[in-house]
Image: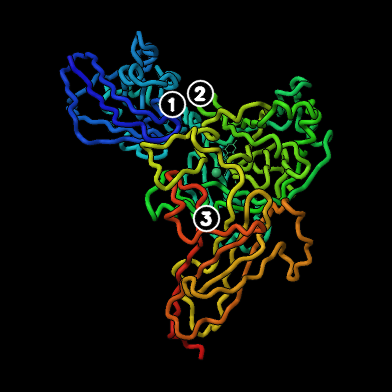
Amino acid sequence: MWKLHFNFLRYQVAPVVASCAVRLSSSSSNEQRFHQHGFSWTRALAGILAGTGVVLACGLHQTVQMRSSLPVISQAEVAKHRSLKDGVWVTYKGGVYNITEFVAMHPGGDKIMLAAGGSLEPFWTLYAVHNQDHVLEMLSLYKIGELSAEDLKKQRDVKSSDPYSSDPERHPVLRPNSLKPFTAEPPPEILSDSYITPSVFFFKRNHLPVPQVDPASYRLHVEGLPGGVLTLSLEDLKTRFPKHTVTATLQCAGNRRSEMNKVRQVKGLNWGIAAIGNATWSGAKLRDVLLAAGYGPDVTQWARHVQFEGLDKDITGTAYGASIPIGKAVSEDGDVLLAYEMNGEDLPADHGFPVRVVVPGIVGARNVKWLGKITVSTEESSSHWQQNDYKGFSPGTDWDTVDYKSAPAIQELPVQSAITTPAEGTVIDRSAEMLTVKGYAWSGGGREVIRVDVSLDGGKTWQVAQLKSSDKEEDPQTPPPLGRAWAWKLWEITVPLPPEAQELEIICKAVDNSYNMQPDTFAPIWNLRGVLSNAWHRVKVKISEDNGEE
Ligand SMILES: Nc1nc2c(c(=O)[nH]1)N[C@H]1C(S)=C(S)[C@@H](COP(=O)(O)O)O[C@H]1N2
Ligand SMILES: [Mo]
């Protein structure tokens, strides 16, 4: 007989915030005991075994007494164990694991049942991003045998079980934050090379494998309106509705998280300053499609939100989802698009082919890609990403106290700017005499950036940068209508190198037309998920005196 004592100290992170202690007893032929011994495992295990796909952090305490030799087990035998009654067995990298106890005790552990009697790999690749070692260590507790060599070979032949295997090629210059799912940003200086960010360089933020959508059989479903369900093909979307083009900046809620992370650790991808881009988007107006689906003045009496669902799904069939307020969706000035083109071409696979929502002025997360369904509702999207992520909290809120229900979902983003060149640590030759600083500036909600201030001396003195709304030398662009400034401004300033200085601390800060400004430091805006990270951007460079050019 053996006993397991698991002490789940806490479930730290979204989507579940709860505390529980689980005591579990089970039996097997070996007498083994698992004692308390500091060992914590996080995201990946919970993602795989509890199937939530997101972060749970638990403290698990154990001492493992390894078995000396384990029996060889066939896949046919493993396949007989796919229920709590018969036991739940899975294979991973040639090992056979009896995870019955884990499933039995774990609330919400039903999703793991999809792997029962078979291989864990597809689930692993879908969810495991971090702490794989910890997961393996955890799994090792449950190991009961080795998969037969023959069956292992068969498994390896089915490589296509990797749900990411059909993800598109990406430009090698992109700097990945994670590969599966793929998330990446370009080198910052690329952003200021052109007013419109080329699609290949545009940051990519996927939560799941890129779905392969056949444009011919693609259907968009619009639900929740008196007109019944409206189903549109891609052709319908292109021909039945006027085509609109909007230049809009898209920014991830986590852009510049790495700077906030330096104050105190936050959870999330460690984005630099380039999880932002500016593109032209073309498609049908969401407003027009909702009108065709029966939207009328009476609907505003009850409808509050428009929900979107992607065609990218996790192993349980749950799609990526988000919602926006109905007012933004139906307003003539909201400019919300069901876009089928980016920068004049079909949407690239990574950016939502064939159709994505573009919600100008609103956080990236609501700009749902690979759009499959639109639902007009009294409720916000119930998706994890609307309810338990992408929200801001006080610097005093930690994972033990956070209540996701207490904060609204992020929609409009605050004013933002950053220096794209020079890069941190650049050495500038004194003989250059002049220094050019470049960057981007943008604000959410259609608020126009009206000024960018730049300092070379850590904020003691300031100069105003020149703003650009196109790539043309002279900038004859008429300003956007009030409240509809969806696109960023690039800015630059060329200044003489200060004569005495050996080192410069370059700072930029933007002001929007509501006179909102960026905070000077990150500490007061720190939040546990590292979102809304918009403090002054600071870059230190050195000036070298020795040169042969005099
Ligand atoms: N269907 C779907 N839509 C999605 C996402 C996703 O993972 N799936 N990620 C969201 C997030 S968090 C961001 S920041 C943007 C990123 O868009 P991009 O990859 O085109 O830059 O897409 C949003 N829309
Ligand atoms: Mo994002």
Residue type, mark 3 in image: Asn
Q: Is residue 362 left or right of residue 258?
A: right
- Quadrant containing ligand 2 reads top right
User: Which mark is nearer the camera, 2 or 3?
Assistant: 3
Sequence-first disc among 2 and 1: 1
Question: Mark 1 falls on what kind of element?
Answer: loop
Give the position of the N terminus as an image quadrant.
top left
Q: Position of residue 533 (x, y in %)?
A: 50, 52
Residue shown at 65% from the left, 60% from the top: 449
Q: Position of residue 387 (x, y in %)?
A: 52, 32
Residue type, mark 1 in image: Gly
Residue position marked by numbered label 3 in the rendering: 534
Residue shown at 66% from the left, 29% from the top: 372
Sequence-first disc among 3 and 1: 1
* Front residue of 520 and 191: 520
Residue position marked by numbered label 1 in the rendering: 51
Q: State yes or no: discs 2 and 1 in contact (Cβ < 8 Å).
A: yes
